Image (cartoon, rainbow, N blue to C red):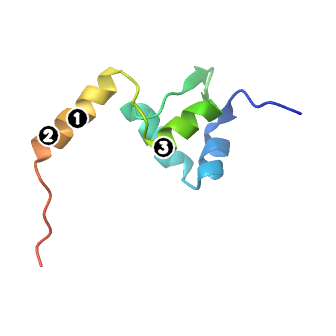
Amino acid sequence: MEQTFALGLKEAAASIGLSHWTLRKYVAQGELRAIRVGRRILIEPTELVRFLKGVGRPTSEGDSKSANLKAEAGPTTRSK
């Protein structure tokens, strides 16, 4: 049985039904942990599971930035 240690960005995106651009955005925002090897962005399968479950978020500067943006935006309401 072959064990996968990390998936390329396109592979990871295809496995969860998102575009690789969306995953790239989450990596840039610090929502999804990734490993950069040369020009490649690799994501561990366990990180994908954590991301999909929404359990815990990585502690990074990107985390506080996204929290601040949400706080500054205030509540969202839709007008009819």
The quarter in which the N terminus is drawn is top right
Give the x, y percent position of residue 64.
25, 27
Task: Report whether 47 appears left or right of 22.
Answer: right
Whole-Å distance between the Cαs marked 3 and 1?
19 Å
Q: Name the residue under label 1.
A: 67
Residue at 54%, 53% in the rendered image: 18
Look at label 3 and name its amino acid: Lys
Relative depth, front residue between 23 and 64: 64
Residue at 40%, 31% in the rendered image: 56
Element marked by disc 2: helix
Where 11 falls versus 19 (above or below)?
above
Whole-Å distance between the Cαs marked 1 and 2?
6 Å
Give the numbered dot on residue 28.
Answer: none
**Labels 1 & 2 near each other (Cβ < 8 A):** yes
Mark 2 burial class by Cα count in 10 Å: few <14, some 14-19, many 20+: few
Q: Mark 3 points at which residue?
A: 53
Residue 10 sits in quarter: top right
Task: Report whether 2 appears left or right of 78.
Answer: right
Relative depth, front residue between 25 and 63: 63
The quarter in which the C terminus is drawn is bottom left
Where 49 falls versus 34 (above or below)?
below
Q: Name the residue under label 2.
A: 71
